[in-house]
Amino acid sequence: MKIKALWWALVLLLAACDKAPAPEESFAGLGSDAADFAQVIPGKAFTFPEDHGPHDGFRIEWWYVTANLKDAQGNLFGVQWTLFRNALKAGPTQPAWHDSTIWLGHAAVTSATRHYAAERYARGGVGQAGAQALPFSAWIDDWSFATRPGAASALADMQLKAGGPQFAYDLHLISSRPLVLQGDSGYSRKSDQGQASYYYSQPFFTAAGSVSIDGKTYQVSGPAWLDREWSSQPLAASQTGWDWFSLHLDRGEQLMLFRVRQKDGAGYLTGTWIDQQGHTETLHNADIQLAPLATTDIDGRRIPTRWSLKIPSKHLDITPQAVNPKAWMNLSIPYWEGPVQFDGGVGYLEMTGY
């Protein structure tokens, strides 16, 4: 998944409405009607590098990178970089200040003892933030995720940069592996009612570079993961939040799975098993056994930070747990996001709606 448009409430604020909108039932308003916008339908033929860029006509979109890093002493770090695009109204993008697009950036660094996050937002059309397909670049202010000069292809050789008052990172990401289309050839369902996104990933990045926390810089390396999604209404009105995992297994496979929670207590659970060659297999609810084992109290919320995850058909039985259980993103709309580790690998976990 990465249903990552956490910024919807912020967008409504930035739209400068005279009257506050009625509260949405779904998490962050992501289940609100989007009939005037472009719709996600099965059978899309993805085209690269064009689909690396923005998708005019869709309401919400994001470029999302996480990295599980380690220094020479074995200290663990997590890095997150996300750029969101939101169209305030349907129709073609307008030039300059007539552009009604809102851009939002999230960046974070996590260690075993510290977690820092920052947020930036910008109006579209004036160059402060944006994305382009060729040469690929996504940016907001001086935060950027971009193809390095001379790269063989758009996502083969990348530079990732961001920072805040107490952290910074500058990472070189490389991969020669194929992109992965999530769900049904890139059509990723989020509910039994038909809500969906277009979704692809690059789970085979290797990252190396520097991470700075509280003025101290560490040289780090490790696996990284890119998610790309766009949609107009990714949730049903009854869905309240999600638990999303991206996992790098030491034995060479990758795993993405998510559970979208609903008001009645049930959830929509699915995932993608990615073998060492990049071939995929869709996992359904019956294939996955997922349950929280322990929680952490944060900001008046009880957040699951240790999980049991079993996929019997893949002989997988693991217990992902947070590197730092206090990895709370205290931003415009708060959520939990941080690195996890388990016997046999590492990964990232995002949890919203708690």
Image: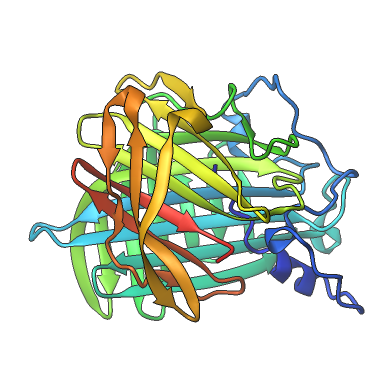
- Answer left or right for 77 relative to 179: left
Q: Quadrant of residue 77?
A: bottom left
Residue occupying image coordinates x 44% and y 67%: 303
Residue 323: x percent and y percent?
27, 62
> Visible in this render: residue 2?
no
Residue occupying image coordinates x 42% and y 58%: 80
> Visible in this render: residue 198?
yes
- Answer left or right for 243 relative to 319: right
**As rendered, which of 233 and 313 lies closer to the eye?**
313
Residue 221: x percent and y percent?
21, 50
Q: Quadrant of residue 44?
A: top right
- Answer left or right for 63 relative to 8: left
Quarter of the image with the N terminus is top right
**In the image, residue 196 above or below residue 330:** above
**In the image, residue 273 above or below residue 266:** above
Quarter of the image with the C terminus is bottom right
Which residue is most to the left? 73
Residue occupying image coordinates x 75% and y 37%: 193
Residue occupying image coordinates x 23% and y 43%: 345
Residue 141: x percent and y percent?
55, 66
